[in-house]
Amino acid sequence: MKVKIGLETHVQLATKTKLFCSCSIENLSEAEPNTRVCDICLGFPGSKPVLNKKAVDIGIKIALALNCKIHREFFFSRKSYFYPDMAKNFQISQYEIPLASNGYLIVNGKKIRIKRVHLEEDPARIIHVGKSITEAKYTLLDYNRSGIPLVEIVTEPDIESPKEAREYLKTLMLILEYLGVFDPKEHLMKSDANISLEGGERVEIKNITGFREVENALNFEILRHKNLLKRGIKPERETRMWDPVTKTTKSLRKKEEEEEYGYIFEPDLVKIVLTEEQINAIKQSLPEMPQEKFEKYLSMGLNKEIAFTISSDLQLAIFFESLLDEFSPNQIDSWILVLKKILNYNDVLLSETKLKKEHFSLLVKKALSGEISDRAFELILREVVFYPEKLEMLLKEYQKISGEKLKEIVLKVIENNKKAVEDYKSGEEKALNYLVGQVMKEIKGKGDAKEIRKIILELLNG
Ligand code: ZN
Ligand code: MN
């Protein structure tokens, strides 16, 4: 059954101050509730919003990175609704002419069209105290969040599965990280998901935090729709909410159209006019994007999987590129993958480890020259990412045993395993593997199995 999904994603922007006032939003998580507020973000009568130009610049940056057309002239509108998170009973947003439109994002080689990108203010934070949202005893409001600049990114319904929705959001997040405008540890990314199945109406699921949850909510909704359609019931047009605790969606309200918000122009803000130079200057300042890095790595001779893995982790990509003054791309790509595996296993970013370029580069040199085995490289790196001071000691400990020294040990093993030697001579191939295993045990894995095998054969046949 064909599934159509469109996403509206709200991203908090990393500015110093709010969108329409000078209240600071730096280290906001450390602030006491309702201490970063003023007449404007509390919506006092008579207070007048003043647009934060920095937020506009960041919005343009994001829109350009999403291949959008920037509107040289745009304005803000009041989106009217009554809810305690919005003290003035309207949200300043953009409707008629947004900041930008008609872009696209490439997700796993597929083009997902971006319908529009606009700026708006974040409402206050609502904290329901009680068992669940529907059974709250009372509700707390924190207006520190009210007025944080948000950029809203709306796709066309080009997404065809919950998994693809998650991948789209991951790609979007990566682009924002590359642009340096979003810190996944500090800021929130929330999405509204529109979904329809063939033969059913469109349903909107509001306010889902994180991309895992978007995938879960959509999977639930598809199942619900399929069950309804199977029973001959057509899913209704409605707005639902996702409950991450029960992992289900609940109906909030029937039918809702954008027009019902009664948008009117915001008379306290003048029309914004951008110059061509301003847009070009921002275009020039855009860094290399993930897709560009991916293609660059392919042209360096990296395979698709490795190129994708490295370009999907900005810190790792920077680290990889910093090593290219000492190594060729193909000399280090597989070692970078080993590093990525270790980072994933520990669930950390490179910046959360103590690994420096010089540690990694030394390890790679030892592996390339054959002084340590591939296995030893990984074992040492596992320790070194957190305890680089152990590097010298570990290199000594794991130094590969080969040549004459290895031969001596093999001789000793042969003498101590007469039975296996006889078995081998009488045609039992397995006995050879046993002998290799005994040598490995003796040298604690610090050797090359192929070399050991070769020495054994030489000694037994010679
Ligand atoms: Zn304020
Ligand atoms: Mn919105």
Image: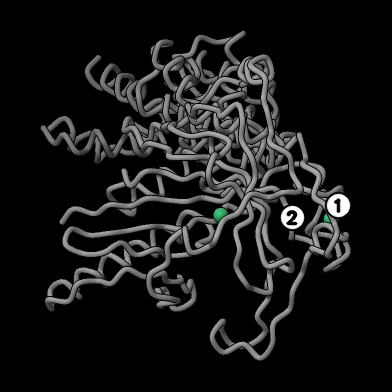
Q: Residue at x 51, y 36 (%)?
A: 340
**Residue 359 appears anywhere in the view:** yes
Q: Nearer the viewer, residue 132 or 386?
A: 132
95 shown above or below 276: below
Tell me if the residue at label 2 has its CB under 8 Å from ligand 1: yes
Q: Looking at the image, do the residues carrying marks 1 and 2 touch, with CB atoms under 8 Å apart?
A: yes
| 388 left or right, relative to 66 | right
Q: Residue at x 69, y 21 (%)?
A: 358
Q: Secondary structure at mark 1?
A: loop
Q: Nearer the viewer, residue 271 or 232?
A: 271
Query: What is the three-letter code of the residue carrying label 1?
Result: Cys
Residue 23: mark: 1
**Residue 397 appears anywhere in the view:** no
Tell me if the residue at label 1 has its CB under 8 Å from ligand 1: yes
Packing grade of label 1 (10 A; few <14, some 14-19, many >=20) is: some
59 shown above or below 197: above
Query: What is the three-letter code of the residue carrying label 2?
Result: Gly
| 321 left or right, relative to 139 | left
Q: Residue at x 40, y 77 (%)?
A: 251
- Measured as percent of width and height from the top left, residue 255 is found at 38, 70
Nearer-N-terminus badge (1/2): 1
Q: Which residue is mark 2?
A: 147
| 230 left or right, relative to 184 | left
Q: Secondary structure at mark 2?
A: loop
- Measured as percent of width and height from the top left, residue 222 is found at 27, 64
Q: Nearer the viewer, residue 181 or 81?
A: 81
Packing grade of label 2 (10 A; few <14, some 14-19, many >=20) is: many
- Measured as percent of width and height from the top left, residue 170 is found at 47, 43
